[in-house]
Amino acid sequence: MTDRLPHEKGFHISWDQIHRDSRALAWRLDGKGPDNGAWKAIVAITRGGMAPAMIVARELDVRTVDTISVKSYDNQSQSAASVLKSPDAQLMGDGTGVLILDDLVDSGKTLELVRQMYPNAHYATVYAKPKGEPMVDTFITGVSQDTWIFFPWDMALQYVEPYRGT
């Protein structure tokens, strides 16, 4: 028996790691766009997809970057996904040629909602959990469903007591 909270099975991601993994995602996506291998735009799912989208856009030389704001979490509690802000409708169409990026696919609810809006877009995440994998076309690292990923934008450096105490 354990007295750990579910989110304490953590996978801590540093800024260096998210940068390396986002570049690896860019390399995997290079030449896969429908316009002679190019993507017409990148859409980041805010907020977590913004850092990976910036890195992928730089690596693939994509200058048109927009956002879609989807809320599906309150801190560490997942709720029903809802769109708070949509990208430019003329840019998006049905999603053809658009690369939609997020940091993580967890349950897949966010991507399921966005896929209904843009069925022909390509969906990519840096990290993927098993329940969400069917919703993503490309990802870099799979993690177990019960792992909580700690992203660098959610963390602060602080002293931590040793495991066995003092």
Image (cartoon, grey):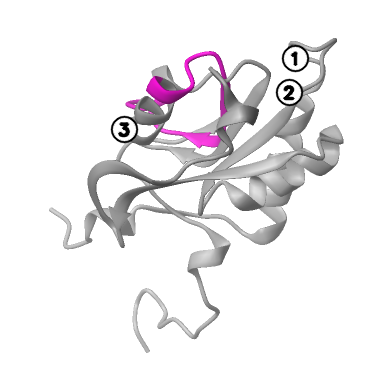
Quarter of the figure with the C terminus: bottom left
Q: Which of disc 1 and disc 3 is earlier in sequence?
A: 1
| Secondary element at tag 2 | helix
Mark 2–mark 3 distance (CA, rounded to whole Å): 24 Å
Q: Which mark is residue 32?
A: 1
Q: Residue placed farthest to the bottom in the image?
A: 166
Amino acid type at circle 1 is Lys
**Is residue 19 positioned above or below 128 on the image?**
below
- What residue span does the magenta drawing correspond to? 116-132
Look at the image and say whether residue 128 sits in the magenta stretch: yes
Amino acid type at circle 3 is Lys
* Residue on which the image places disc 3: 109
| Secondary element at tag 3 | helix
Look at the image and say whether residue 58 sits in the magenta stretch: no
Q: Residues within 10 Å of mark 2 (few under 14, many from 20)?
A: few
Residue 19 visible, this orientation: yes
- Residue drawn at the location 59% of the way across and 37% of the way down: 88
* Residue on which the image places disc 2: 28
| Secondary element at tag 1 | loop
Image coordinates for residue 90, horizontal then vertical, percent: 61, 28
Name the quadrant containing residue 23.
Answer: top right
- Mark 1 and mark 2 in contact? Answer it, CB < 8 Å: yes
Q: Residues within 10 Å of mark 1 (few under 14, many from 20)?
A: some
Mark 1–mark 2 distance (CA, rounded to whole Å): 8 Å
